[in-house]
Structures are given as C-alpha cells and as structure tokens.
Amino acid sequence: MRISVFLLALVLLASESWAGSLVPLTVTTGTGEAHVFQVEIADTPEERGRGLMHRDELAADRGMLFVFPRRERITMWMRNTRIPLDMLFIGDDGRVEQIHERAVPYSEATIASRRRVRYVLELVGGTAERLGIGEGALVTSDAMR
C-alpha cells in the first residue's frame, strides 16, 4: 500500500511539473463574452522552443501564452506537436491581430504573423470558432507585461 501511495504521489508530481505553473488569462470577444483559460507561460527561448510539443491532450480551458521580449514578426510551427491548435497572434495592446485555426499536428510548415506582435496564445484547435473569438478580441492576463 505504501508503494502505491508513493507511486501515485510521483505521478501527480510529474504531471504538475509537466504542465508548469498556470496563470489565468481572459479572452473577451467582440460581443463582450469573456472566456477564462488557465495558461502556461513560455517566456524564455527554451520554453518557447518546446511549446506544447509531445503532449497527448490539452484541456478545453487550458493553453500556452508565448511571451516575446518585443514586438516582432513571429513564426511558429507544429513540429512534434500531437494535437491541433488555434494560434492567436496578439499585439502589445492585447488585441488579437490574427488567428491561425486548427494548425496541423506534426507539420513543419511555417505559421507566420502578418504583422509584428508581442504574444501568441495557443488553444485547443477549434476553440476560436467554438467560442466566437475573432480578430479584435481582447486578451488580458497579469502575464502580459
């Protein structure tokens, strides 16, 4: 029994460290609907490079916010990413400037922002359409500096 409890504790600890710290983030649509997500922050080159690779699932209310040090044209890809994702390219002001919906798992095709942006929010593929999130939606979080 002790070994089982110990193994369960290790599994729970490992799953927590895999997910990283979660912070709340709100996306407010053009119609005023607010949707709250719990997101991991990728704000170092290593974290941004790893992203959501090698994950088998992502809960509907989870995501990852990529934070870049300054506005730039961002390029993303889906290498080693197993689940389809929506990528929301976000400006300094928190406004969604572009959305790439349902990025194809494992694709190495470049997904580029049309303009210089500061953030990219990745959500489960189909979330933007399902929740009515479009260009101009407002994204807010304490993680957005």
Image: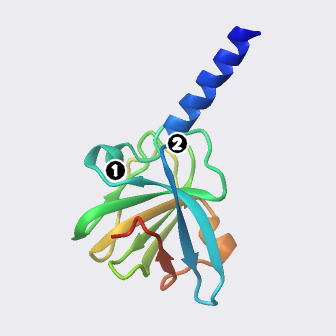
Residue at 55% over, 80% down? 134
Where disc 2 sits, the SS reads: helix
Residue at 48% over, 75% down? 140
Q: Residues within 10 Å of mark 1 (few under 14, many from 20)?
A: some
The amino acid pointed to by label 1 is Arg
Residue at 53% over, 67% down? 25
* 55 to 119, vertically: above or below: above
- Marks 1 and 2 sit apart, C-alpha to C-alpha, by 14 Å
* 50 to 136, vertically: above or below: above
Q: Residue furthest right?
A: 1
Say which residue label 1 marks: 48
Q: Quadrant of residue 112?
A: bottom left
The x, y position of residue 117, in whole percent, is 31, 73
Where disc 1 sits, the SS reads: helix
Q: Nearer the viewer, residue 32 or 7?
A: 7
In the rendered structure, the answer to whether residue 102 lies left or right of residue 145 reads: right
The x, y position of residue 10, in whole percent, is 59, 22
Say which residue label 2 marks: 19
Q: Nearer the viewer, residue 81 or 42?
A: 42
* 104 to 13, vertically: above or below: below
The x, y position of residue 103, in whole percent, is 51, 57
Q: Residue furthest bottom?
A: 31
Q: Nearer the viewer, mark 1 or mark 2?
A: 2
